[in-house]
Image (cartoon, helix red, strand yellow):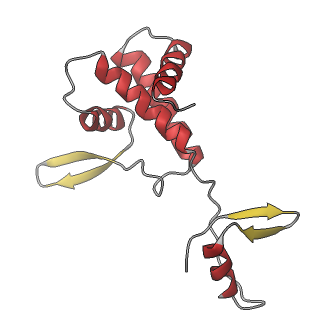
């Protein structure tokens, strides 16, 4: 079955697009189906996170790429899974893709990442100062 967006109107859910309309037509009258409620992630929130990483990259010489910084961030804030090998445990960073995290999960991830930046990457940095820098960077990129 297809994944599609719906909107709540009164006490009913209605498909938002052609994909949803088509999927709904394939559900028989009175047929019971299972749904998973997820709020789609806000692309602006995702851009905000990568603007923060961009600021860090511009102000340090240790990390060689955004991917390295992202992986370290995930590991330091515990966004990882543990794999047991014959040589011991290994931490593997988890995905932050839109499919892997809804908006609520990403919001929690973002807050933990900001705390990591303010406590370990730039000790003493205030959250509101970080937020201001991120907003300024987004404006540079033409993203509100």
Q: Position of residue 14 (x, y in %)?
A: 76, 70
Identify the image quadrant of residue 24.
bottom right
Q: Relative to 17, is 94 above or below?
A: above
- In this view, the residue farthest toward the left is 87
Q: Position of residue 33 (x, y in %)?
A: 67, 81
Residue for point 65% across, 62% down: 37
**Camera-nearest residue between 119 and 100:** 100
Q: Relative to 115, is 72 above or below?
A: below
Q: Position of residue 55 (x, y in %)?
A: 37, 21
Identify the image quadrant of residue 9.
bottom right
- Quarter of the picture holding the C terminus: top right
> Along the horizontal axis of the image, is 56 left or right of 21?
left
Q: Position of residue 87 (x, y in %)?
A: 11, 49
> Along the horizontal axis of the image, is 90 left or right of 13?
left
- In this view, the residue farthest toward the top is 124
**Camera-nearest residue between 137 and 97:** 137
**Camera-nearest residue between 75 and 82:** 75
> Along the horizontal axis of the image, is 67 left or right of 9?
left
Residue for point 47% across, 31% down: 112
> Along the horizontal axis of the image, is 103 left or right of 85?
right
């Amino acid at each position: 079955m297809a994944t599609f967006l719906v909107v709540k109107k009164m006490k009913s859910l209605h498909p938002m697009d052609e994909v949803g309309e088509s999927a709904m037509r394939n559900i028989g009258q009175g047929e019971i189906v299972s749904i998973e409620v997820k709020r789609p992630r806000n692309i602006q929130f995702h851009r905000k996170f990568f603007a923060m990483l961009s600021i860090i990259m511009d102000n340090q010489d240790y990390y060689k790429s955004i991917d390295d910084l992202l992986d370290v961030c995930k590991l330091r804030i515990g966004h990882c899974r543990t794999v047991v090998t014959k040589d011991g445990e290994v931490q593997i960073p988890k995905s932050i893709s839109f499919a892997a995290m809804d908006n609520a999960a990403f919001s929690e991830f973002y807050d933990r990442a900001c705390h990591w930046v303010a406590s370990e990457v730039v000790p003493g940095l205030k959250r509101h100062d970080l937020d201001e820098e991120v907003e300024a960077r987004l404006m540079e990129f033409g993203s509100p």
